[in-house]
Amino acid sequence: MARDRLDRLPTVVALGARVRLADTLRARLLGLALLEGIVDDELLLIPRCGSVHTFGMRFAIDVVFLDAGGAVLRHVEALPPRRLVSCRGARALIESRAGAAGRLLDLS
C-alpha cells in the first residue's frame, strides 16, 4: 500500500533516474516514510521545503538541498531514521536511497 502512494506521484525521467514529485501536502509530509526501500535510480523531489525528518523511515536516505535556481546548497549522505536536518536558504530538496544521490546527481 505504501509503495502505491509513491507510484501515484507525478514522475519524470531525468538525470538517468525516475524523479517523483511530491506535489501534495500529504506527499510532502510523508516523503519516503513507511516504505521498505526504493530503487537506486529513484529520486523524490519535494518543492518549497528547507528541512526534512526521517521519523517513520525504515532505511537511510541521502538529502540534497537546492536553492531557488536549483543549485545544490548541501548534500547530507546516509541520514539515518529518526533524525531532523535543515538548510538555510533551501527552496526544495531531493531524497534518495543512501548513496544514490551523489552518483545520480554527480555530487562528487
Image (cartoon, helix red, strand yellow):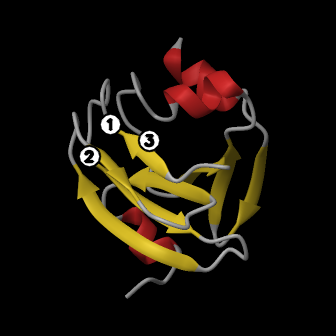
Calculate the distance from the C-alpha at mark 3 to the C-alpha at mark 1.
Answer: 15 Å
Near mark 3 (Cα within 10 A), the count class, few <14, some 14-19 or many ≥20, is some
Q: Which disc number belongs to residue 81?
A: none
Q: Which disc number belongs to residue 54?
A: 1
CB contact under 8 Å: marks 2 and 3: no
Disc 1 marks a residue whose amino acid type is Thr
Residue ID for mark 2:
60
Instruction: Classify mark 1: helix, strand or loop.
Output: loop
Where 49 falls versus 23 (above or below)?
below
Where 4 falls versus 27 (above or below)?
above
Camera-nearest residue between 14 and 107: 107
Instruction: Classify mark 3: helix, strand or loop.
Output: loop
Front disc: 2 or 3: 2
Instruction: Classify mark 2: helix, strand or loop.
Output: loop
Comes first in the chain, label 2 or label 3: 3
Where 57 falls versus 48 (above or below)?
above
Instruction: Please state the horizontal and vertical placement of residue 89, each as a whole percent of the image.
Output: 55, 67
Calculate the distance from the C-alpha at mark 1 to the C-alpha at mark 2.
Answer: 8 Å
Q: Residue at x 67, y 49 (%)?
A: 48
CB contact under 8 Å: marks 3 and 1: no
Residue ID for mark 3:
38
Q: Residue at x 67, y 38 (%)?
A: 22
Q: Residue furthest top?
A: 1
CB contact under 8 Å: marks 1 and 2: yes
Instruction: Please state the horizontal and vertical placement of residue 77, each as a whole percent of the image.
Output: 28, 64
Comes first in the chain, label 3 or label 1: 3
Instruction: Please state the horizontal and vertical placement of residue 37, each as a whole percent of the image.
Output: 37, 36
Q: Residue at x 53, y 11 (%)?
A: 1
Near mark 2 (Cα within 10 A), the count class, few <14, some 14-19 or many ≥20, is some
Disc 3 marks a residue whose amino acid type is Ile
Disc 2 marks a residue whose amino acid type is Ala
